[in-house]
């Protein structure tokens, strides 16, 4: 009788656990993955015909555009053939940059917010480089691919899931490259750390962190027509996640052997930006949508986690956080750059002393420097000196542009594909869904539609 009762109790417990698991699963807010149309194929590892001389049209010449004009015009085999902006003074200024670099003048397009359509239709353009406001990024990118051009789009390249799927579907149908211009993956600490991780120095990476923490008070007025503040005022969610997401996803080989399954987001109330608006204009804002500080936690198919933060109003030092936590080591960039490693990983036979907190510290500065030299990424070995001379966020912008052009010229897969764009931009809408549902978990779509483990690791084509 006791055995029967015990068995009965066990069955009740198992049933209860199953019910709880079912409830937990049902609590995840689902997202829709549209079916891939017949004849449409994924663009993983996409190779296109080599383009020896890449003809570039740059649309959007406000804050980011002029720097792109300067960098691209200093890469061999590149011709900037078209410059486009709402304001004529911006196209004029960028043609002056071309002249200073000894390059021929580009055709200018200006005057309104739809003149870009003339540019994507040009026959003498191979690559459309988009640096406009966020809301027009995806629209221009889609049309450029339909017009037969490869496209590179500033961050974030899409603000909604509909825009993301439109970019993916258009890239898959046209077989044109669609790359997000995420510069932070090329930063010297990040790319060196990625090389260390890929060579096993940290063991298995289980957790990664990234952020965009950057008080924008000195810059808000620089955005044409106040578009960036207005976007934060009227939209809720992590609207600028890619600087943190890019390096973190690369560490974890997202859609290259692992995929993100769901996220949960939480935010503070909005204080800083409404106060800024009132101080600048006298307007009392009571409907500001985006909170001052946002946190998002992500879990992957293989049981790994990512933490992403967003804060553009607090008086905090600039930080992209950037952390990699593995079974044998740890990397951290902000606020202090350093590595902490298993003693065996750096060739030490000294047993750790748990009474000595130094055993849990970063390696000494000279060891860190030696590691960074030993594991310097091949891309940096080739480009670091030139990149630091030409500049762009310390050189990482130049490396980003150079790698884009190099791969187009050689007919190689780009370092970042349209699925990277999708995953890193998806937080804009997915975090909003979580916040508006009391921080509920939200499913992250498989933007590859079943091909997330076709590739087994991140590789940069050479």
Image (cartoon, rainbow, N blue to C red):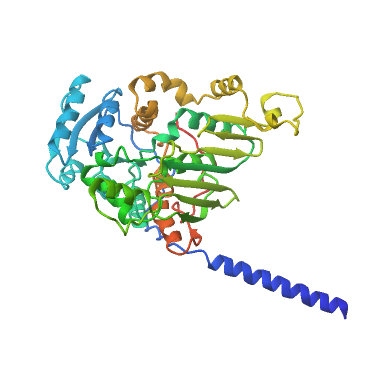
Residue in the image at 28% along x and 35% along y:
64
Which of the image's four quarters has the N terminus? bottom right
Residue in the image at 67% along x and 33% along y:
360
Of 85 and 404, the residue lying toward us:
85
Q: In the image, is 411 to the left or to the right of 223?
A: right
Which residue is at the far right?
A: 1
- Residue 137 in view, yes or no: no
Say which quarter of the image contains residue 148: top left
Of 88 and 73, the residue lying toward us:
88
- Residue 303 in view, yes or no: yes
Of 65 and 422, the residue lying toward us:
65
Q: Position of residue 418 (x, y in %)?
A: 39, 45
Residue in the image at 39% along x and 26% along y:
394
Q: Position of residue 301 (x, y in %)?
A: 57, 52
Q: Is residue 397 above or below residue 456?
A: above
Q: Is residue 160 above or below residue 81?
A: below
Q: In the image, is 170 to the left or to the right of 441?
A: left
Q: Position of residue 5 (x, y in %)?
A: 82, 78
Q: In the image, is 61 to the left or to the right of 6?
A: left
Residue in the image at 51% along x and 34% along y:
335
- How many marks the image carries: the answer is 0
Of 187 and 48, the residue lying toward us:
187
Q: Position of residue 110 (x, y in %)?
A: 13, 40
Which of the image's four quarters has the C terminus? top left
Q: Is residue 283 above or below residue 115?
A: below
């Amino acid at each position: 009788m006791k055995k029967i009762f015990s068995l009965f109790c066990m069955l009740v417990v198992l049933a209860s656990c199953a019910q709880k698991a079912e409830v937990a699963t049902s609590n995840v807010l689902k997202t829709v993955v549209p079916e891939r149309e017949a004849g449409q194929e994924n663009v993983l590892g996409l190779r296109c015909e080599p383009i020896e001389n890449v003809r570039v049209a740059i649309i959007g010449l406000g804050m980011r555009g002029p720097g792109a004009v300067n960098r691209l015009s200093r890469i061999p085999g590149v011709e900037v053939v078209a410059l486009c902006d709402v304001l004529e003074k911006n196209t004029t200024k960028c043609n002056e940059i071309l002249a200073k670099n000894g390059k021929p003048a580009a055709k200018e397009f200006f005057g309104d917010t739809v003149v870009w359509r003339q540019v994507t239709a040009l026959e003498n353009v191979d690559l459309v480089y988009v640096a406009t406001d966020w809301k027009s990024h995806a629209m221009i990118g889609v049309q450029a691919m339909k017009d037969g051009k490869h496209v590179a789009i500033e961050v974030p390249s899409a603000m909604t899931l509909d825009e993301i799927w439109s970019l993916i579907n258009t890239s898959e149908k046209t077989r044109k490259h669609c790359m997000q211009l995420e510069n932070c993956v090329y930063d010297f600490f990040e790319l060196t750390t990625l090389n260390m991780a890929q060579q096993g120095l940290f063991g298995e990476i289980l957790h990664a962190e990234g952020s965009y923490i950057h008080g924008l008070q000195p810059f808000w007025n620089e955005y044409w027509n106040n578009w960036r503040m207005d976007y934060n005022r009227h939209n809720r969610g992590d609207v600028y996640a890619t600087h943190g997401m890019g390096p973190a996803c690369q560490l974890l080989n997202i859609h290259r052997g692992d995929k993100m399954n769901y996220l949960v987001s939480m935010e503070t109330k909005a204080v800083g930006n409404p106060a800024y608006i009132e101080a600048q204009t006298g307007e009392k804002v009571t409907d500001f949508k985006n909170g001052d500080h946002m946190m998002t936690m992500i879990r992957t198919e293989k049981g790994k986690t990512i933490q992403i933060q967003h804060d553009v109003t607090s008086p905090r030092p600039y930080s992209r956080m950037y952390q990699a936590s593995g079974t044998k080591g740890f990397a951290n960039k902000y606020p202090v750059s350093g590595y902490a490693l298993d003693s065996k990983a750096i060739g030490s036979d000294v047993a750790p002393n748990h009474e000595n907190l130094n055993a849990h510290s970063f390696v000494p500065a000279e060891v860190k420097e030696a590691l960074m030299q030993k594991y310097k990424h091949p891309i940096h070995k080739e480009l670091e000196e030139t990149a630091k001379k030409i500049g762009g966020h310390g050189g990482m912008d130049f490396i980003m542009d150079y790698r884009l052009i190099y791969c187009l010229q050689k007919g190689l897969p780009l370092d970042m594909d349209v699925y990277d764009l999708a995953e890193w931009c998806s937080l804009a809408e997915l975090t909003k869904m979580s916040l508006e549902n009391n921080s509920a978990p939200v499913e992250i779509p498989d933007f590859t539609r079943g091909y997330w483990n076709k590739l087994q690791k991140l590789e940069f084509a050479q």
